[in-house]
Image (tube, grey):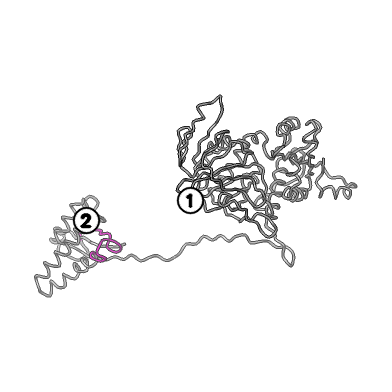
Amino acid sequence: MERCPSFADEEEEEEESPPERQIVVGICAMTKKSKSKPMTQILERLCKFEYITVVIMGEDVILNEPVEKWPACDCLISFHSKGFPLDKAVAYAKLRSPFLINDLDTQYYIQDRREVYRILQEEGVDLPRYAVLNRDPDRPEECSLVEGEDHVEVNGAIFPKPFVEKPVSAEDHNVYIYYPSSAGGGSQRLFRKIGSRSSVYSPESSVRKTGSYIYEEFMPTDGTDVKVYTVGPDYAHAEARKSPALDGKVERDSEGKEIRYPVMLTAIEKLVARKVCVAFKQTVCGFDLLRANGQSFVCDVNGFSFVKNSMKYYDDCAKLLGNIIMREMAPQFQIPWSIPTEAEDIPIVPTTSGTMMELRCVIAVIRHGDRTPKQKMKMEVKHPRFFVLFEKYEGHKTGKLKLKKPEQLQEVLDIARLLVQEQGDLGDAVAEEQKSKPEQLKTVLEMYGHFSGINRKVQLTYLPHGHLKASSEEEGRMKTLIACTHL
């Protein structure tokens, strides 16, 4: 058993005034994981919580001691990796009933890609199109494979090359991508990073004939994979790396670390992160996204994963884990702890003159005060042809009529052209004056050579008394209309 170093160093100073009941957080994982740089960085920050003590369980204890002799804890951070006895961790959790940061039973599912895809599908998460080939003698109906030169047919589903072949065991990282003969054939064989390589090309074009696999459609990305890391359902950190399917060469910086690029997640991708975190009951969880064809597809769920070489992430992760633990455990231990809210979580940043609040964003709601003026013309018309048009399209029912269709506008233009011609034949000064309005209407409707913009609509309104003064006889027998075209 090993206490968190930052807490142990202060233990002697606090002997004179022992702290109140501490919440013991147990770390149960293989040494390679529990002593890794990301875990060390996060635990050092976690120990700064006044009421939290961290205890790291040694690998020898985990592997060789019965769970009854494992150190007791109130909260457990435990996760599977190569060589880890998950069965013992589950038994310990049943014995001690600690608060689990990451559910243990679900970690069995994470080790099986078939279960991972099933759960994701149930949650409505987008996946590449896939089929499962189970080479199980007890289920022969799930083992139908027909291989062609440039495709495979798995249980009736056809996958043209390029396609991906993944072992059903998530612990097996030998993923193959098969290329069509038009691209030279062969396959790209992916594996866990060895030095500066993560894949190698092989001339072999035939799929593997032993073992169970998932066959899925190859997703054309921009040459990068997006790695997402959650800390609870409301926090997700994302970064991109060069896809191992490109040339298999790992990009590294001057310090030998794999180069990764920060990525902003879309609102849909954030929702996906939440679904993955909740569905697998893993507070700290990593998964892979493929951005292709304008969508994002989850292609792998890795379970407990930390971001490497990000101080901001270490700060965020420790703070979130501490708040989660305190929110759950403080009431049980009657610890005086107030739950911080987002409003109280004031961002403070260091400066040369001390610390100050950091402005994160400015939000403004603006409405412009300008309005686009309508482009329109108005005129009174009294010609019988307009009344016929008004009646034809049943304007008499409401007293108003809107004409928008090209054939309707063409009818108005034909009338305007006829009026201009008729009045032009009269040849007197009165006719010239009367002709000005129809000519204007004709000009507007003929604008652009087709009906759009300013000449896209004509409105007719019935005026029983007209706009001009008229005798009672005229007022009784004439209908006056306004014809206008506008935007």
In this view, the residue in front, 161 or 445, is 161
- Magenta-drawn stretch contains 450: yes
Q: Is residue 339 left or right of residue 409?
A: right
Residue lying furthest right in this view? 16
Determine crowd level at label 2: few under 14, some 14-19, many 20+ residues with C-alpha closer than 10 A: some
- Total numbered labels placed on residues in the image: 2
Residue of label 1 = 294
Q: Residue at x 28, y 60 (%)?
A: 456
- Report the magenta residues as a range: 445-465
- Magenta-drawn stretch contains 316: no
Residue of label 2 = 408
Rounded to the nearest whole Å, what is the CA distance between mark 1 and mark 2?
42 Å
In what element is the residue under mark 1?
Answer: loop
In what element is the residue under mark 2?
Answer: helix
Q: Position of residue 379 (x, y in %)?
A: 22, 65
Say the numbered circle drawn on residue 364. Answer: none
For the residues labelled 1 and 2, say whether their Cβ atoms are less than 8 Å apart.
Answer: no
* Quarter of the N terminus within the rendering: top right
